[in-house]
Amino acid sequence: AVSVKMLSETPRAFSNLEVRVAGTLRNEVHNYFRDRPNLFLIDQDGYKIHVAPWLRMEILPHKGDSGPPTLSQFLDQQVELTGALAPVQDAIPWMFYVHRAEIVR
């Protein structure tokens, strides 16, 4: 596993390589219901990387079962993400694309 600090300080070294990284997933938006998700993985020292949404925020409840996972289940949780950091052209220079995610208990 690599640290959030390593990914944030030397993103080119990890460009398009599959890595595992742990931290707290946060959605930094002004209005949770109106704004598009603006996800970051943050470590205990405040280093952070931008994370692309990989699930829907929420879904309508299913009868009798919990349904598929949603982003809201992962927010403000300690998580371990497996994925790849890739350059983006816009205002966000690097984005982490999640291939697999789990909540760390």
Image (spheres, rainbow, N blue to C red):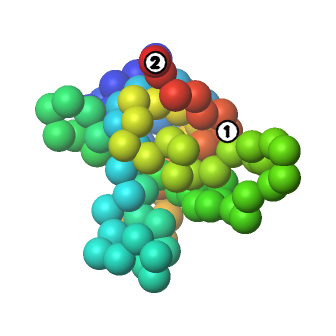
Q: Look at label 1 and name its amino acid.
A: His
**Image position of 79 with respect to 48: above or below:** above
Rendered residue at 20%/30% (across/down): 44
The outermost residue toward the bottom is 34
Labels 2 and 1: the sequence-earlier one:
1
Residue that appears at 69% across and 45% down: 69
Q: Which residue is mark 1?
A: 99
Whether residue 41 is visible here, answered yes or no, is no
Mark yes or no: residue 71 visible: yes
Type of the residue with mark 2: Arg
**Above/below status of 11 relative to 100:** below
Q: Quadrant of residue 35?
A: bottom left
Residue 70 in the image: state x and y as whole percent. 63, 51
Tell me what residue is drawn at x 47 percent, y 21 percent.
104
Residue ID for mark 2: 105
**Position of residue 54 in the picture relative to residue 6 (left or right):** right
Q: Is residue 1 above or below residue 93?
A: above
Image spot of residue 23 (x, y percent): 36, 31
